[in-house]
Amino acid sequence: MLRVLVAGFGGIAGRGIRAILRPPEFLVEECPVDAVTALVAATHPDVLLLETGPYDGFGRDMRSVAVAAGTTVVECSAHRTTLRVHPPTGGCFTRPLSEHALLDSVRAGGRG
């Protein structure tokens, strides 16, 4: 089971994410944005799924903490048509945002 920490999404988006990332393959935990750093450090999830909004200011800090902890970061937003994946090994790649791309990106992050 892949542990996925989801942060920053509203209620509707959160329900949609839970509908896509379902048990038994995924264990999804949601948290407020201000708790991400502490939860990543404490729980070491496989993937951090982060809503970055139209701006990326706060996302950079959380991404750095997560990647340093060995967690893959998948960033997406209702304000973009792409998602960005930051593996803990470094680098970044972008994919068109879709259910399939989200599933593949989270699964790949769990492999590590």
Image (spheres, grey):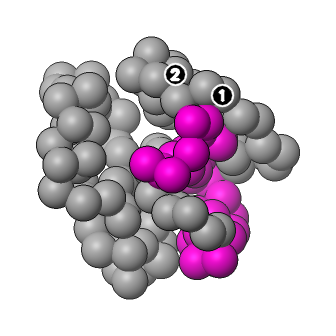
**In x, y percent, where is residue 5?**
35, 54
Image coordinates for residue 96, horizontal then vertical, percent: 61, 26
The number of discs equals: 2
In the rendered view, would you say 18 is above or below 78?
Answer: above
Q: Is residue 49 above or below residue 63?
A: above
Task: Classify residue 7 by image quadrant.
Answer: bottom left
Does the stretch in magenta take in 79? Answer: yes
* Label 2: which secondary element: helix
Read off the residue under disc 2. 101
Near-viewer residue (50 or 107): 50
Above or below for 21 versus 38: above
Q: Residues within 10 Å of mark 1 (few under 14, many from 20)?
A: few
Give me the residue at 71% from left, 34% from top.
94
Q: Is residue 25 visible?
A: yes
Residue drawn at (29%, 74%) of the image: 32
Contact flag, marks 2 and 1 (Cβ < 8 Å): yes
Badge 2 crowding class, 10 Å Cα cut-off, few under 14, some 14 to 19, many 20 or more, is: some
- Location of the C terminus by quadrant is top right
Q: Amino acid at mark 1?
A: Arg
Q: Residue at x 18, y 49 (%)?
A: 12
Q: Which quadrant would the N terminus be assigned to in this image?
A: top left
Specify which label sits upstream in the sequence, 2 or 1. 1
Secondary structure under tag 1 reads strand
Amino acid under label 2?
Answer: Ala
Left or right: where does residue 68 sit relative to residue 99? Answer: right
Given residues 17 and 67, the one toward you in this image is 17
Give percent across and percent down for residue 91.
83, 45
Classify residue 17 by image quadrant: top left
Q: Which residues are magenta?
A: 57-85
What residue is disc 1 on?
Answer: 95
Confirm whether residue 43 shows in the render: no
